[in-house]
């Protein structure tokens, strides 16, 4: 008897626990329904979604969420909720009917027709009427185009349109037949192989479908190839797969190369005598060419983007958005001279945003193609380590000739400070060169962030030092500069991490023919025009002088104002000298360094 009581108690506890789990969503649902009754639809949507996270198999909650989403105009999301409710409760005809109408509204006529057809067979009058409204124009269109291809089997447009109408009506045999005929008429249109592969897959012709997709992948344009790649099997195609694809598409020389490569023959990259695969025709409607150009540009297929955007421009020479996109495409193709032309045209757009973006791009590129280019920068810095203000500045005018690999320039530099000297034991230590340097030089253009330069000039000391015998001195200097930034740099549209490095190697004749290395590195987080960062810097020289060999690290921040070529910085640094022979100070130091960087180009 006691055993039966134990069994009954166990069952009761299990049922109670199960009920508690099932009821876990109840408080959330109660809150959601209260929001719905108060017409707080956003709150109701959030509540129903929270309830589904707890109990995802409740069809009624999916259904109620779908109706609520309809109230706020989220038609696509509502359709998806009704689809899930229909999956969970296939006998709820009202949900299925709502789903079918939403499919039709959201441009999914095939799914709508199938659902209406299923409901119509059960006697649903509304579904029967809706099905007929969709099916009648399809039947009539198929009949009309079938007569057209009987009269003219070589009519590509008729073959393609017949195939698409048949696919929408689920006449898969007709669709497959005429997709293939359309492609045979224009074998360069390998996007039709994707359509053919899709239909064959629905017909359970798996090998044929795979062959069509592989042929589109290996022989289509980059855009088609990318679409086909997403439909490939998990494994890399085998030799037999390539051979079936070649049997379907015998003029696809990419497949010939693949087969030769897999058989151990001539590698594909060495086969230079194959005829080129034809490019897709560009006689599509302007809006289609524009859309395909924008999609190709977005995915990085610059060659395709250029073809489609040029076709769109030829169809509508007044489309300033296309001009702007052409500018960006040429810019990414490293043809900045052509990019400048398109940015200049796009500046005339009546749309303010387009005109502003084009004007900004034009201003950034224009100095690169001016015969003379003048740059100016200044960097005043206050240092608590030296209790002094230092000033660094340069104005430089370059001569840019396209046929000359280097750029001749004239330069004037300022290197100085306010305090001048620091008394340190015996004699005085000078804090800067306190010079204006006039020079002529040669510089290379940037290559992967690296530039090289050399100049010869004369240094004029603007403040005479004790014991100094002459105010001018020859100055020869040169070196390299490397700059690289990664991540969300200052001014980025979205916040995120960043890293930067600025590295300079310099030879200076006036310092006993010494060479110096300056490496400034920082990383941190960017919030628009504000950065929080950490510094890691190194300074070294070939002659191992104590004042030129040190490392330093510490936190900092940088910020700028929109529209101003000014960058403010403040850093708290802890440093250590690497060599301390003849060092009159301590081997370590703390420093607050505040600076303002200003620059412009004309």
Image (tube, rainbow, N blue to C red):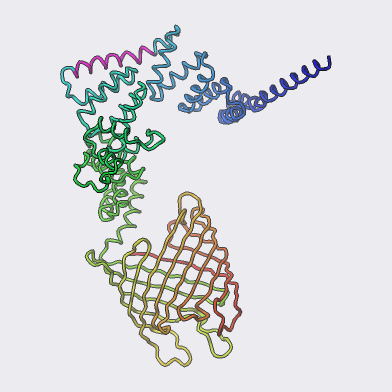
Give 150 or 571, whichever is nearer the viewer: 150
In-image side of 267 versus 33 (left or right): left
Which part of the image, by quadrant, shows the N terminus? top right
Question: Residue 253: image x %, image y %?
Answer: 23, 39
Magenta part of the chain: 131-149
Q: How many marks?
A: 0
Relative vertical location of residue 426 with respect to residue 563 in this rendering, above or below? below
In-image side of 581 versus 131 (left or right): right
Question: Residue 508: image x %, image y %?
Answer: 40, 79
**Residue 327 lies in magenta, yes or no?**
no
Q: In which quadrant of the rendered view does residue 448 lie?
A: bottom left
Question: Residue 33: image x %, image y %?
Answer: 62, 24
Q: Residue at x 47, y 88 (%)?
A: 465
Relative vertical location of residue 352 with respect to residue 546 in this rendering, above or below? above
Give 453 or 246, whichever is nearer the viewer: 246
Q: Farthest residue in the top direction? A: 123
In-image side of 260 versus 564 (left or right): left
Question: Residue 373: image x %, image y %?
Answer: 30, 66
Relative vertical location of residue 98 with respect to residue 226 in this rendering, above or below? above
Majority secondary structure of magenta residues: helix
Q: Residue at x 25, y 25 (%)?
A: 180
Q: Residue at x 54, y 77 (%)?
A: 388
Q: In which quadrant of the rendered view does residue 102 lie?
A: top left
Which part of the image, by quadrant, shows the C terminus? bottom left
Relative vertical location of residue 458 with respect to residue 450 in this rendering, above or below? below
**Residue 141 lies in magenta, yes or no?**
yes
Q: Farthest residue in the right direction? A: 2
Give 176 or 363, whichever is nearer the viewer: 176
């Amino acid at each position: 008897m006691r055993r039966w009581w134990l069994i009954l108690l166990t069952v009761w506890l299990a049922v109670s626990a199960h009920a508690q789990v099932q009821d876990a969503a109840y408080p959330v649902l109660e809150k959601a329904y209260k929001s719905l009754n108060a017409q707080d639809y956003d709150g109701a949507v959030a509540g129903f979604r929270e309830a589904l996270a707890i109990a995802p198999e409740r069809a009624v909650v999916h259904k109620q969420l779908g109706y609520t989403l309809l109230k706020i105009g989220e038609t696509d999301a509502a359709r998806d909720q009704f689809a899930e409710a229909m999956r969970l409760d296939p006998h709820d005809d009202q949900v299925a009917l709502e789903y079918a109408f939403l499919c039709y509204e959201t441009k999914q006529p095939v799914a709508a027709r199938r659902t209406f057809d299923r409901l119509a067979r059960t006697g649903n009058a509304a579904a029967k009427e809706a099905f007929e409204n969709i099916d009648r124009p399809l039947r009539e269109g198929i009949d009309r185009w079938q007569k057209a291809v009987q009269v003219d089997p070589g009519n590509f447009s008729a073959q393609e349109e017949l195939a698409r109408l048949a696919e929408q009506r689920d006449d898969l045999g007709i669709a497959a037949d005429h997709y293939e005929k359309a492609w045979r008429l224009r074998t360069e249109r390998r996007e039709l192989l994707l359509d053919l592969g899709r239909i064959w897959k629905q017909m359970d012709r798996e090998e044929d479908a795979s062959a069509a997709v592989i042929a589109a992948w290996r022989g289509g344009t980059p855009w088609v190839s990318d679409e086909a790649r997403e439909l490939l099997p998990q494994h890399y195609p085998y030799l037999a797969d390539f051979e079936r694809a070649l049997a379907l598409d015998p003029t696809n020389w990419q497949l010939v190369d693949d087969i030769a490569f897999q058989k151990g023959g001539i590698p594909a990259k060495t086969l230079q005598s194959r005829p080129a695969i034809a490019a897709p025709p560009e006689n599509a409607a302007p809006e289609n060419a524009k859309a395909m150009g924008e999609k190709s540009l977005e995915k990085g297929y610059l060659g395709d983007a250029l073809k489609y955007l040029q076709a769109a421009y030829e169809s509508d020479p007044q489309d300033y958005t296309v001009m702007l996109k052409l500018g960006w495409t040429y810019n990414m193709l490293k043809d900045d001279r052509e990019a400048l032309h398109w940015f200049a045209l796009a500046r005339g757009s009546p749309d303010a945003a387009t005109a502003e973006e084009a004007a900004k791009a034009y201003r950034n590129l224009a100095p690169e193609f001016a015969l003379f280019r003048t740059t100016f920068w200044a960097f005043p810095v206050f240092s608590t380590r030296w209790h002094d203000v230092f000033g660094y500045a340069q104005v430089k005018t370059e001569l840019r000739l396209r046929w000359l690999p280097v750029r001749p320039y004239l330069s004037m530099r300022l290197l100085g400070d306010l305090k001048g000297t620091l008394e340190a034991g015996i004699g005085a230590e000078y804090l800067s060169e306190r010079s204006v340097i006039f020079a002529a030089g040669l510089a290379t253009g940037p290559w992967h962030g690296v530039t090289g330069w050399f100049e010869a000039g004369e240094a004029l000391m603007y403040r005479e030092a004790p014991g100094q015998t002459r105010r001018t001195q020859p100055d020869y200097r040169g070196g390299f500069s490397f700059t690289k930034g990664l991540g969300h740099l200052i001014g980025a549209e979205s916040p995120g991490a960043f890293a930067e490095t600025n590295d300079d190697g310099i030879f200076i004749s006036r310092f006993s023919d010494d060479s110096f290395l300056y490496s400034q590195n920082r990383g941190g987080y960017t919030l628009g025009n504000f950065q929080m960062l950490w510094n890691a810097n190194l300074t070294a020289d070939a002659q191992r002088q104590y004042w030129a060999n040190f490392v330093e690290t510490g936190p900092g921040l940088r910020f700028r104002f929109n529209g101003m070529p000014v960058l403010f910085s403040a850093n708290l640094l802890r440093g250590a000298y690497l060599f301390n022979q003849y060092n009159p100070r301590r081997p370590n130091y703390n420093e607050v360094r505040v600076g303002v960087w200003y620059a412009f180009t004309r």
